[in-house]
Amino acid sequence: MKGIVLSIIIANYNAKALLAGCLESIYRHPPTRAFEVFVVDDASSDGSSAMVEEHFPQVHLLRNAHNVHYSTSNNRALDVAQGQYVYLLNNDTVMLPEALDAMMIFLDQHPQVGAVGSRLLNGDGTVQASVKTLPSMMSGLFGSRSMLTKLFPGNYFSRQHLLHLRHGLSAPFPAGYVSSASIMIRQEVI
């Protein structure tokens, strides 16, 4: 396809129902600019590939002969993605209205920024710890999975490393690490 602005890449392994929900949400809330969607299936045995072929024939389905895992699957699609922007998306994600356009607009308006992440919400509406400082000994001690953060949630040191605790998430801010569950990257950065 010519003129593709956004390439959405979803790695999948045995998550047919989640993948169907993710794809349905993309097409229910599509970006306003030309886009393509890739699903890279890691030899799922649950009928994921057949579901994509039957219900989402517009999706580029890439099948791996065996489970090569997340990064290798994403890299396979990156090799053929045509978009100016590439969006890595987890298969258990449900896209909200205007989210894709908002990220593209942000990158359009900030040419110095190489990638942008989105706010990620859990099923109950709480915010996921998806944006952090660069990895360090301190971030390991006070990260989202650390015992110290679990025992003392919201403490000063955890707020310094788990940036969603420090920022209101209503306006963009610089981050050291953005979760690849939802990250839009400039093609030239890749």
Image (cartoon, rainbow, N blue to C red):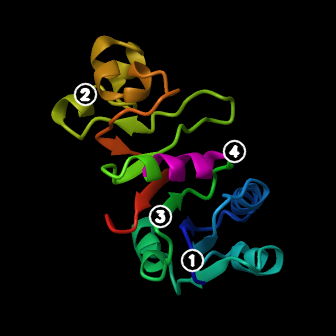
Horizontal and vertical percent for residue 22? 70, 57
Residue tagged by mark 2? 141
Q: Nearer the viewer, mark 4 or mark 2?
A: 4
Is residue 98 covered in magenta?
yes
Q: Relative to the observer, which residue lies in front, 36 or 104?
A: 104
Please name the amino acid that badge 2 sits on.
Leu
> Where on the picture, by quarter, is residue 151?
top left
Q: Residue at x 74, y 75 (%)?
A: 52
Residue 164 visible in the displayed image: yes
Label 3 secondary element: strand
Horizontal and vertical percent for residue 110? 38, 47
Q: Tag 2 or tag 4, which sits nearer the N-term?
A: 4
Q: Tag 3 or tag 1, which sits nearer the N-term?
A: 1
Q: Nearer the viewer, mark 1 or mark 2?
A: 1
Give the class, few, some or many, for how many residues have Cα within 10 Å of label 1's Cα (few <14, many ≥20): few
In the picture shown, does residue 175 fall above or below 124?
Answer: below
Q: Relative to the observer, which residue lies in front, 44 or 167?
A: 167
Please name the amino acid that badge 1 sits on.
Gly
Q: Nearer the viewer, mark 3 or mark 2?
A: 3
Q: Tag 4 or tag 3, which sits nearer the N-term?
A: 3
Q: Which mark is residue 3?
A: 1
Left or right? Give the position of 163 relative to 74.
left
Give the class, few, some or many, for how many residues have Cα within 10 Å of label 3's Cα (few <14, many ≥20): many
Predominant secondary structure, magenta span: helix
> Where on the picture, by quarter, is residue 156?
top left
Residue tagged by mark 3? 85
